[in-house]
Amino acid sequence: MTAAPIRALPLDELRRRTSEKWREYPDDVLPLFVAETDFPLAPAVTAALERAVRTGDTGYVASRTPLAEAYAGFASRRFGWAAEPGRMRSTADVSMGIVEILRRVIRAGDRVIVNPPIYPPFFDLVQEAGGVAQSVPLRDTGSGWELDLDGIRDALADGARAVLLCNPHNPTGSVHSAASLDALARMAEQHGVVVISDEIHAPLTQPDAVFTPFLASGEAAARIGYAVTSASKAFNLAGLKCALMITASDATTAVLRSLPIEVEWRTGQFGMLAAVAAFSPQSDDWLDGLLVTLDENRRLLATLLAQHLPEARYRMPDAGYLAWVDLTDLGWGPNPAKQILRQARVALHFGPAFGAEGAGHVRFNIGTGPEILAEAVERIARARASISAAVHERAAGL
């Protein structure tokens, strides 16, 4: 039986929110840039937060919580992965977890491999940890994207000391295959380096794709890998601050245990309570319904682009609610989102922020209602003539 879709809240209600998505731009702009969704919270999450407010459960996060056990149960149900609660620690968010692990496994100036187009903060996180980001772009196969294992091998042979992986990948929505993850892990182990896998979008993998946790992709991955994940993307909990750092070997677990206790105490109390509820079986039906909605939206975007912007190139994501769209053939320059914001009053994420490979691209957030998605594409199509004219005038120096 197919789960009932989760419907987005109406626009007038969404505009009462005070988060980044709804406060960055004026009300005449449709915001489809930052990774927040427009759906009501899962009922179990709402109940957990309401209960905490009623009882004043707003103190420091405890040294022992049910979070690791809740995630282990979720990973078992959703991914068939027997993650061990004793090999997990929490922190405020995935970005913080990445930085704290990197600080333990690289030295100042070490190169860390990233795979652009990539979530823009990856570049900053590597720098914050004292490293230097080394780009090994994804390979475009013609029908999708995959890790460039040959390029990664060359970078490792040349001295790179870590790999910062995004699985599922942001912004393309690609889910890396188990074979490619295992090959990456064995290659990393051969060169004595670690892999840190950001798996925050994993709960949003569509049923027609298969998500493989990096740590479960093979024995080498278990020995040298770290995973960092959160309920925040799937359940729209980013502001509550809770993430998990996960390992699968004694050596990597020792690294987690060496982190200062303050790293764990940065976990938000509300974030922990909400994540436990999100990872519980009580939220499974809600998550299944969200996946139905996102499947409808990824297909709707394909239809809308074909109808209104046929030059756009788009592949439906296998996971998440972020759509990577190539607008190069529209001739709107390397950063078309700027023109779209100015002329169409639609805010999309700037493609070049994801690396040089993002030139000519935009990232759509499709975690919204179909009517908002349709209005956004139609606005862009209506503004097409003025956008093209503006680009032409600048090129001509007028």
Image (cartoon, grey):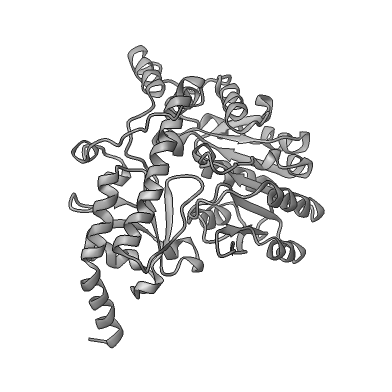
Q: Nearer the viewer, residue 235 or 258?
A: 235
Q: Nearer the viewer, residue 280 or 370?
A: 370
301 versus 50 height, above or below:
below
Which of the 4 image quadrants contains residue 81?
top right
* Residue pictured at 47% horizontal, 61% vertical: 354
Residue 114 in view, yes or no: yes
The furthest residue to the right: 190
Which percent across, then down, holds residue 360? Answer: 41, 69
Residue 237 in view, yes or no: no
* Residue pictured at 43% horizontal, 20% vertical: 59
Q: Nearer the viewer, residue 135 or 178?
A: 178
Q: Nearer the viewer, residue 312 or 29?
A: 312
32 versus 307 height, above or below:
above
Q: Number of numbered discs present?
A: 0
* Residue pictured at 37% horizontal, 15% vertical: 51
257 left or right of 358 in image: right
* Residue pictured at 23% horizontal, 62% vertical: 344
- For the C terminus, give its image quadrant: bottom left
The furthest residue to the top: 55
Which of the 4 image quadrants contains residue 337?
bottom left
Which percent across, then down, holds residue 160? Answer: 71, 60
Which percent across, then down, holds residue 72? Answer: 61, 26
17 left or right of 147 in image: left
Which percent across, then down, holds residue 327? Answer: 38, 67
